[in-house]
Image (cartoon, rainbow, N blue to C red):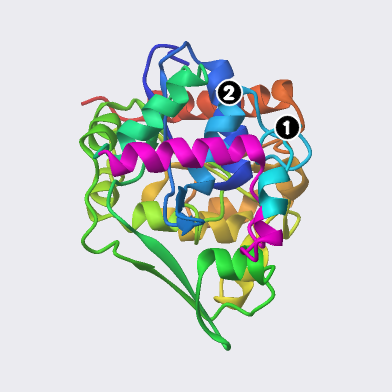
Amino acid sequence: MNPSAPVVALAGGVGGAKLAVGLAEALPPGALTVIVNTADDLTLHGLHISPDLDTVMYNLAGLSDPAQGWGIKGDTTGALDLLGRYGGPTWFRLGDKDMATHIRRTQRLSEGARLTEATAELCGALGVRSRVLPMTDSPVATRVQTPEGELEFQDYFVARGTRPRVTGVRFQGAETAKATPEAAEAIDSAGTIVYCPSNPIVSLGPILAIGEIEERLRRPEIPRIGVSPIIGGSALRGPAADMMKSLGHEVSALGVAEILRDYIDGFVFDDEDAPLLPAFGERGIAARTAPSVMTDTPSKKRLAIEVLGFAEEIRNQAPAG
């Protein structure tokens, strides 16, 4: 493994944030850039909220709630409780410290800062040494199609608890959204691309829906490694398994790899699913297994080292020239 080669990780949700921590631990400071899904963003209480950006940022800053994987550990909800007494919506749980993040982001955006710039300022204030980039500064919104009609993502995910059956997904605004100069440069200069164990449909899918990013991720000259969020036919958290099933995908590590097939050179999945290795071979997908449940910093770092080591093997196997 070349410890100085820049690594770009694509992430969304808790699984993506956890592996980002592992990669940051395994790489020198400044070698990691995390490009994060922003199609989950919403405006609530007049505040611009970026759930996936904040989950990655809090995890990299060592502030995240260890039980939830998101939010800030030890946070309180006094402001939200009083908002409820005033008749405001409380279905999206915002902690008091967490709310400070959204207030500052909203203020900077209202002053003309790009989301990329506001994110860099927040990360810098929290001592995050890796670069965290929104996938775009343009508005993109995940819309989930269900028998109840089309729902905003947070309505489906939080307010309705992922109960409605998903019949389709679209990313409103993605067709005109632009890659930021920072995201484009990071991908163009990367030595390795890692697809974190995030929901392939609504966490990685929006990033791949940005045309200028999608084109860059088809690069055959650098290793691109995917990591499965599905273990033993289930997702550790979130709706990935149910969503994959309802949309006709095989609910397995192999099913995730097939979704990402055009963008990966190798795939890492949990030891529990080792019987799937022959099927990967039959479909021409390079694969390896590793312990992939990340419960603490050492386990996150171990998985990151496995992923980076696999990338280096693929790099060394590539034909010269």
Q: CA distance from mark 1 to mark 2?
A: 11 Å
Query: Which residue range is magenta in the image?
Result: 83-111
* 42 up-or-down from 271: above or below: below
> Is residue 139 part of the magenta span, yes or no?
no
Q: Position of residue 37 (x, y in %)?
A: 44, 48
In depth, the one of 45 and 123 nearer the eye is 45
Residue sitting at x 40%, y 23%: 316
Q: Is residue 161 left or right of residue 16?
A: right
Counting other residues with Cα less than 10 Å from the Cα at mark 1, is it few (<14), some (14-19), or many (20 or more)? some
> Is residue 100 part of the magenta span, yes or no?
yes
Residue type at numbered disc 1: Lys
Residue 163 found in image quarter? bottom right
Residue 175 found in image quarter? bottom left
Mark 1 touches mark 2? (CB < 8 Å):
no
Residue sitting at x 72%, y 52%: 81
Q: Secondary structure at mark 1?
A: loop
**Of the two numbered discs 1 and 2 in the rendering, the one whose residue sits closer to the viewer:** 1
Q: Position of residue 183 (x, y in %)?
A: 29, 36
Q: Which residue is mark 2?
A: 61
Q: Is residue 194 left or right of residue 148?
A: left
Q: Which residue is mark 1?
A: 73
Q: Position of residue 263 (x, y in %)?
A: 38, 49
Residue sitting at x 73%, y 51%: 236
Q: Main secondary structure of the magenta part?
A: helix
Residue sitting at x 57%, y 61%: 255
Q: Earlier in the sequence, mark 1 or mark 2?
A: 2
Q: Secondary structure at mark 2?
A: helix
In depth, the one of 304 and 44 nearer the eye is 44
Counting other residues with Cα less than 10 Å from the Cα at mark 2, is it few (<14), some (14-19), or many (20 or more)? some
In depth, the one of 14 and 236 nearer the eye is 14
